[in-house]
Image (tube, helix red, strand yellow):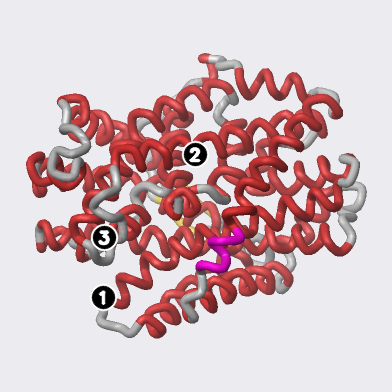
Amino acid sequence: MVAAGAAIGLGNVWKFPYLAYRGGGGIFILVYILIVILLAKPMVEMETAIGRHGKSDTVSVFEKIDGKWGFVGWIANICTICINFFYVVVGGWVLKYGIHFLISGDFGDNPSVFYQSFISDPVQPLVYNFIVLFTVVGLLLFGITNIVEKISKIMLPALFFLLIICGFYSMFATEGALEGLKYYLMPDFSHFTVKVFADAVTQVLFSVGIGWGIFTTLGANVPQENNIRKDSLIIGVMDTVAAILAGFVIIPAAFGAGVDVQKGPALIFEVMANIFKNLPGGRIIGSLFFIALIFAVLSSLFSFIEISVRTFEIKMKMGRKKAIILGSVVIGIGNVLVSLGFGPLSKVRLPWPSFGGIEYYGFYDWFDCFTAYLLLPLGCLLTCFFVWRKWGWIGYEKEMTADGRDGKLTWWNRFLIVFLVPMFMLVVLLNVFGLIK
């Protein structure tokens, strides 16, 4: 449940809907579900088994099996820190909207103007950003994250319930919503491209939490009596249901409200402001929705930040408090760059190498590309090779199945690890550098 709490968050509710729309709706959903089935379960199994076997930080667990392979864990740490650069920023936006709903719920005649005015401000977003960051860091320092975890047990089901309410409301109360639902659910194979496939793969990695040390870190605390196979299946199913449910709300509502669904990061904020503006009791429901979502954000961030904290603590031989402070300082610097990248630094562009020539991205887009399309697939590719060639089938099967108690490693498991998952990763890597389109 901790792993599911880490997985269910902004990746499902914030990022999935706009990628699903951009990827053609129904065809993206179909590809996404297939990738979850073929990719998510074996990757979560491998990472959890490595973590349970090593019982340490995400670098040391690889080194326990092969001392030269700790670099895979360092890649995961770099990836997680860079994801936190923008994850905390968006978490601050969620907090802002939750508080604004509580205070007034008035976003003006055009929620898009409110959103753009807020994120482009040089101060406001950073204030909310650091409230979120300091809250997580403070709870980690004092070791009382269980308070948020207990509240999240109530808030996460509440978030699901509120999404369902909003979904049905948007279906019957907004014109054009049924057309949006049709677009979302009916696959149109003419929209399928390599880019759609790459987006679906990277979204599975980001949303479920694969390739960036979450399951190797959490796996260190998984008891031997746990069935890794069943746990991995549950995590994948829960995360996918959350993502599809969020898209069921956001995309039809955006069609009905006439919101440009390709706006990307803005989508959830503008759409939900429109829904709650017209929904009876919308101010209360909107407050509950964003409050529930901020608890999902906090629950995820505990696991995200813990990955680098544990590595700093063990590999760099720091005390826990120093490790937490170091991690928060690095993340805070990245947060400043990303947040200002939507405002005063919006004209700053970072280079990205591509076969077709150098491309230039803003801070958010660059870190998103660097993590989702390079480090995540690279980490998965290396993990597959590590399990296959360095750990070996005998050692992996023994840990993953608890010495045969939970079944055997089949030819299909081996096929996924040796061929299919690496092939998916190679497609993403070739696509991001413009070698295939």
**In this picture, which residue range is highlighted in magenta?**
146-151
Mark 2 or 3, nearer chain start: 3
Toward which corner of the image does residue 228 lie, by quadrant?
top left
CA neighbours of label 2 inside 10 A, class few (<14), some (14 to 19), many (20+): some
| Secondary structure found at label 3 | helix
| Between 23 and 60, the one nearer to me in the picture | 60
Left or right: where does residue 33 sit relative to residue 348? left
Residue 149 shown in magenta: yes
Mark 2 vs mark 3: in front: 2
Where's residue 315, x and y in %?
Answer: 24, 75
Residue highlighted by disc 1: 314
Residue highlighted by disc 2: 238
Left or right: where does residue 365 sit relative to residue 70? right
| Residue 408, above or below 312 | above
Mark 2 or 1, nearer chain start: 2
Where's residue 271, x and y in %?
Answer: 76, 42
Mark 3 or 1, nearer chain start: 3
Amino acid under disc 1:
Ile
Where's residue 241, x and y in %?
Answer: 54, 34
Toward which corner of the image does residue 335 lie, by quadrant?
bottom right
| Secondary structure found at label 2 | helix
| Residue 254, above or below 177 | below
| Residue 377, above or below 96 | above
Amino acid under disc 2:
Met
